[in-house]
Image (cartoon, rainbow, N blue to C red):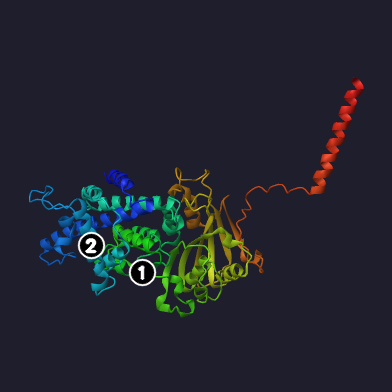
Amino acid sequence: MFEQVFKSLDDIMFQEPGCNSELDYAEQSSWMLFLKYLDDMEHERTLEAHMTGNAYQPVFEPQYRWSEWAAPKTAEGKPDLDRTRIGSDLVDFVNNSLMAYLRGFAETSSNPNSIQAKIGQIFTEFRNKFGNGYMLRDALDLIDSLNFGTQDQKSELSDLYETRIANMGNAGRNGGQYYTPRPLIRAILKVVKPKLGETIYDPAAGSAGFLCEAYEHLKGEATTPDHRQTLQKQTFYGKEQAPLAYVIGLMNMILHGIEAPNHLRTDTLSERVADIQENDRYDIILANPPFGGNKNKQLQQNFLIRSSESAYMFMQYFVESLKGGGRAAIVIKNTFLSNTDRASIALRRQLMHDCNLHTILDCPSGTFLGAGVKTVVLFFERGRSTKDICYYQLDPGRNMGKTNPLNDKDLEEFVSMQAGRALGDKSWLVNVSDLDEETYDLSVKNPNEPEEEPLREPQEIISDMLARDAETAAILEDIRGLL
C-alpha cells in the first residue's frame, strides 16, 4: 500500500507546475509525510499516557494538528466535509498560517535538542510548492490513508523514504551529496562493529544514511530503558551545511526512530582543527564527504595541510575528531590514493603516521549511481601508525547501474575476509616499508591478477611491419613467376 501511495503522489506532483524534479517530489512529499507521522505518534503517546494515568502535553496546538486541518473526521470516523479545506482556502492556510506556526518552534523552543526545535528547523527550510489547492487536497488525502501505528508500518515507511532519497540522488543532481548505497553502509558497519555506548559521528551527513543504518544496527542491543535513552540521546551526532540535505537527513533520522536527533545545520569546515578538544572527539566517524574545489580561502586557513579540495579538508577534520583508539570508515575518490600534488602526499603521510590505515576497499564504477566517479573506503584507527594495509578489490562480476545496483550479497566476501583476515584472489596485503617514502602512493594494484604483456617499443613495431612487408613482397614475386 505504501508503495502505491508514493507512486500516486508522484503522479499528482508531476501535474503540479511548482514541482519540477525528483528533488521537489522528495521535498513536498516529505513535509506532508512528516506531519502525518507526528500526528500518529501524538495519538499513540496520548493513549499510552491515558493507560498509565500520566499527563501528556501534545506538541501541536489543536488547530495545527494533522487530524484537524489536513483530515478532519466526524464522530463516526468519516471525512468531515464541512471542515475540510480545499482550493485556495487550503493553500492560504498552509502557506500563511501552518508554515508560519511550525517555523515559530525554532524561536520558541527553549531546548535545542527537543522535537519542537527540530520541527522548527525543518520548516524553516521547507516551502509548500503546491499552487493548486485541489491537487494539494488529493495529496493530503493519499497520505492520510497511511498509518504508522505499528513497528512494521514505521519500518516500511523508512524503507520507502530511503528509496525516495535514492531516486533523488539518482536523478543526476547531487547524487553523492544525498545518497550513499545502503548495502555499502551496512558492510562498513559490520567491519567497524559499533557498540552500544560508543558515540557515532557523521560531520558530512547528507541524508544521514550512515546514522540511520547505525541506529538499525544497534537498536536490537537496547534492551533496557537506560539503553534506549543512551541510544536516543547520546549515540548519534551529525552535521550538514546544505539546507535541503540537512532537513532530509533530520527527517530521515526521525522516521527511522531517532526522535530528537543531535543533528546540526552548520559548515563543519568552518571549525579550526587546532581548536578541537578531547570532549569534541568521537569513538566512531562514518562519512562520505563532498569532493570538489572549495574557493573559500578563509576556510583553508583552518587546516594544517592547505588544499582547495573539500574532501582533503574533511579528512584532516576526521582524523583530529577521533578519540584515541577511535575508528573511522571514510568514502573518498580513488584519486586520493595516487595524486602527486603536495597536499595529497602530505595528507597520506599524516594518515599513515597518525593512524592505522588497516583496510582499503576498492569500489567499482557504478557503485554510486549518478555520481560517475570511482571511490574507495578507507578504514583506520587513530593512535598508532600503519604497519600493513589490507586491500580488497570489490568485483560483483557485472556492470552495475540503476537496474542492477550494489547489493548486500556483493559485499559478503569482503565482510567475511575482514572478520577472519583471510586473503583471496581479490585481496592482498601491502607492507608500509614497501611504499615509496617520497610519494606514499597507495594505488590499488592487485598482484593476483595476471600481468598484462608490456607494450612494445615503437622501433620494434616498425621493424616487425617492415619484415611483414618484405614477406608479402616475396610472396607476390613468387606468384608473378608462376603466371
Q: Which mark is residue 58?
A: none
The label on residue 96 is 2
Q: Which mark sits nearer the N-terminus, 1 or 2? A: 2
Residue at the (29%, 50%) spot, across then down: 156
Instruction: Please count the marks in the image.
Output: 2
Extreme residue toward the left, this view = 75
Above-or-below relation of 461 to 320: above
- The residue that appears at 31% across and 44% down in the rendered structure is 11
Q: Position of residue 294 (x, y in %)?
A: 51, 67
Question: Can you give x and y, in whole percent of width and height, for residue 258 in the image?
Answer: 30, 62
**Dot 1 corresponds to which residue?**
264
Residue sitting nearer the eye, 78 or 250 = 78
201 vs 66: above or below: below
Q: Relative to the observer, which residue lies in front, 375 or 386?
A: 375
- Dot 2 surroundings within 10 Å: few (below 14), some, or many (20 or more)? few
Q: Is residue 59 left or right of residue 207?
A: left
Classify residue 118 as left or right of residue 477: left
Q: Quadrant of residue 443?
A: bottom right
- Where 396 sits versus 41, above or below? above
**Residue at coordinates 56% horizontally, 51% vertically from top-left?**
426
Tell me if residue 455 can be seen.
Answer: yes
Which amino acid lies under the numbered mark 1 shown in the image of this protein? Leu
Q: Do the CB atoms of the residues marked 1 and 2 lie less than 8 Å apart? A: no
